[in-house]
Image: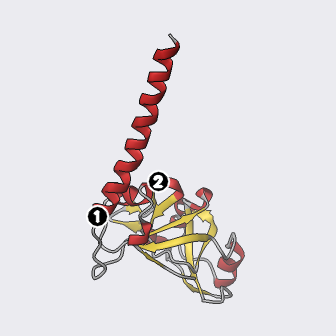
Amino acid sequence: MMNHIKIYGFFLLGLSLLACNSAKKQAKAITIEFNKKPTIIYKAKPEYANKVPVSLSADKQQIVAYPAPKDLYTKGVLALPVALEKGYYLDKRGVNNNTAFLNISYEEYAKLEKAPSMEALKSMIIETSSIEECFDCGNITTIEKLNILIKGKALTKCKKIER
């Protein structure tokens, strides 16, 4: 009985190593072109996934861009970011290292008649350094390929957007 447990344990260990190696091999096989519309992925706190992003100045003191309530839609659907592996998100709204998130959800903001005043927007910022990491992954638009890069630890193929 003990031999069966050992064999089963080695079998599971082998499968998990094979799966990790497979993701790395798949990630190496993906080529990225950077001359097309960029695919931006970023890492932020999960509780920000449904919060409205705004762009801040380089010194993070001023809001330089914010959406109108109707701008949160793409083809009639709220343009929420797509959750990827390991806490990353696929951007649909122009997120970068100078992005901050407001304390209002996409759904709530989209229902507003017009965007809040600049003072109101500033008071709604949760924190000014909301983005942990941000990458331009060129022409990769499929969630599957992005997750392969993330799981295969191959985000170095993407351009890191520096702070």
The residue lying furthest to the front in this view is: 3
Which quadrant of the view contains residue 109? bottom right
Q: Are marks 2 and 1 in contact (CB under 8 Å)?
A: no
The residue lying furthest to the right in this view is: 123
Q: In this rendering, which labeled residue sits more in front, label 2 or label 1?
A: 1
Residue 7, placed above or below residue 62: above
The picture places residue 112, in percent across and down from the top left corner, at 55, 68
The picture places residue 136, in percent across and down from the top left corner, at 41, 75
Exactly how many numbered labels are in the figure? 2
22 to the left or right of 128: left
Report the residue at 52% width, 64% height from top. Answer: 111
Q: Amino acid at mark 1?
A: Ile
Residue 71, placed above or below residue 150: below
Q: Residues within 10 Å of mark 1 (few under 14, many from 20)?
A: some
> Closer to the camera, 111 or 54?
54
Q: Give the CA separation, mark 2 to mark 1.
A: 17 Å
Q: Amino acid at mark 2?
A: Glu
> Closer to the camera, 134 or 95?
134
Residue 3, placed above or below residue 159: above
Report the residue at 33% width, 74% height from top. Answer: 138
The picture places residue 141, in percent across and down from the top left corner, at 31, 65
Secondary structure of the residue carrying tag 1 is: loop
Is tag 2's residue or tag 1's residue first in the polypeptide sequence? 1
Mark seen at residue 85: 2
Report the residue at 48% width, 27% height from top. Answer: 9
**The C terminus lies in quadrant:** bottom right
Question: Which residue is label 1 attached to?
Answer: 30
